[in-house]
Amino acid sequence: RKEVEQDPGPFNVPEGATVAFNCTYSNSASQSFFWYRQDCRKEPKLLMSVYSSGNEDGRFTAQLNRASQYISLLIRDSKLSDSATYLCVVNPTDKLIFGTGTRLQVFP
Amino acid sequence: DAGVIQSPRHEVTEMGQEVTLRCKPISGHNSLFWYRQTMMRGLELLIYFNNNVPIDDSGMPEDRFSAKMPNASFSTLKIQPSEPRDSAVYFCASSFGLGGYEQYFGPGTRLTVT
């Protein structure tokens, strides 16, 4: 079983739609969680950290469910510029484990 | 503020040649990570350093790969000899420490070995 699993997508959604991604992780000792965003042919960039109580940053909401070992990312009012691959990241030890990413394509 | 700096941005070389990739972490960060990304294998952690000391190199694919961090502001990843299957994007990332700190990535070096 992979340490971090994500649906690769692609998720094709129209502008203005709400879209959600889930990610599951295998190591219950994981303490820190993040979502990164990677544009085509660019480096991964930190989108947001994920806190136990859930957190919001503008149109983006992240949730953590430790009991079921999954994290989620909700994007409201999708923009064309949200098109990218979203990487789920957890840290079970002293390094970060990256998922393979979920691709989002927002169309006009 | 300067982010992580990598050079070169693109490298095309012939099989058997030595390749050296360079990275300058964000000032004040004491942990540095080298990753490789391909379509087939995704993002793979090769090696990481803390306070210039290699902590875990279990991700280095073969003895042909080596990495050094002679000081807090510079690291190299060397492939000798290079092979076509080494073609990938190599990213360097840095963070304030190990564990749960977020990592910041450089723009990557796109390596093509012919």
Image (cartoon, rainbow, N blue to C red):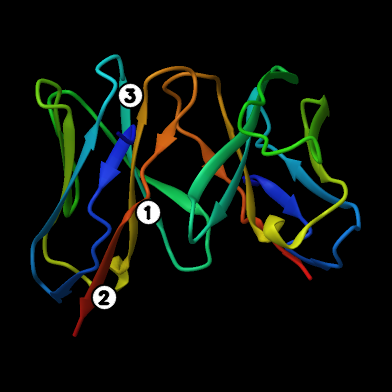
- The answer to the question of whether label 1 and label 2 lie on touching residues, with beta carbons closer than 8 A, is no
- Element under label 1? strand
The residue furthest bottom is A108
Please state which of the two labelled residues, at mark 1 or mark 2, is closer to the viewer: 1
Is residue B24 placed above or below A106 in the rendered structure? above
Residue pictured at 68% horizontal, 58% vertical: B85
The residue furthest top is A29
- The answer to the question of whether label 2 and label 3 lie on touching residues, with beta carbons closer than 8 A, is no
Residue for badge 3: A32
Instruction: Tell me which corner region of the image, top left, top right, bottom left or bottom right, holds residue B25.
Output: top right
Looking at the rendered structure, the kind of residue marked 1 is: Arg
The residue furthest right is B17
- Element under label 2? helix
- Element under label 3? strand
Residue for badge 2: A80
Asked whether A22 or A16 is in front, the reply is A22
The residues tagged by marks 1 and 2 sit, at their Cα atoms, a distance apart of 14 Å
Asked whether A18 or A65 is in front, the reply is A65
Upstream in the sequence, badge 2 or badge 3?
A: 3
Upstream in the sequence, badge 1 or badge 3?
A: 3
- Image x and y of residue B35, in percent: 60, 43
Looking at the rendered structure, the kind of residue marked 3 is: Ser
Residue pictured at 16% horizontal, 42% vertical: A72
Instruction: Tell me which corner region of the image, top left, top right, bottom left or bottom right, holds residue B52.
Output: top right
The crowd level at tag 2 (other Cα within 10 Å; few <14, some 14-19, many 20+) is some
- The answer to the question of whether label 1 and label 3 lie on touching residues, with beta carbons closer than 8 A, is no
Looking at the rendered structure, the kind of residue marked 2 is: Leu
Is residue B37 placed above or below A16 in the rendered structure? above
- Image x and y of residue B72, in percent: 77, 26
Residue for badge 1: A37
| Quadrant in the picture for the C terminus of chain A | bottom left
Discs 1 and 3 lie in a common subunit: yes
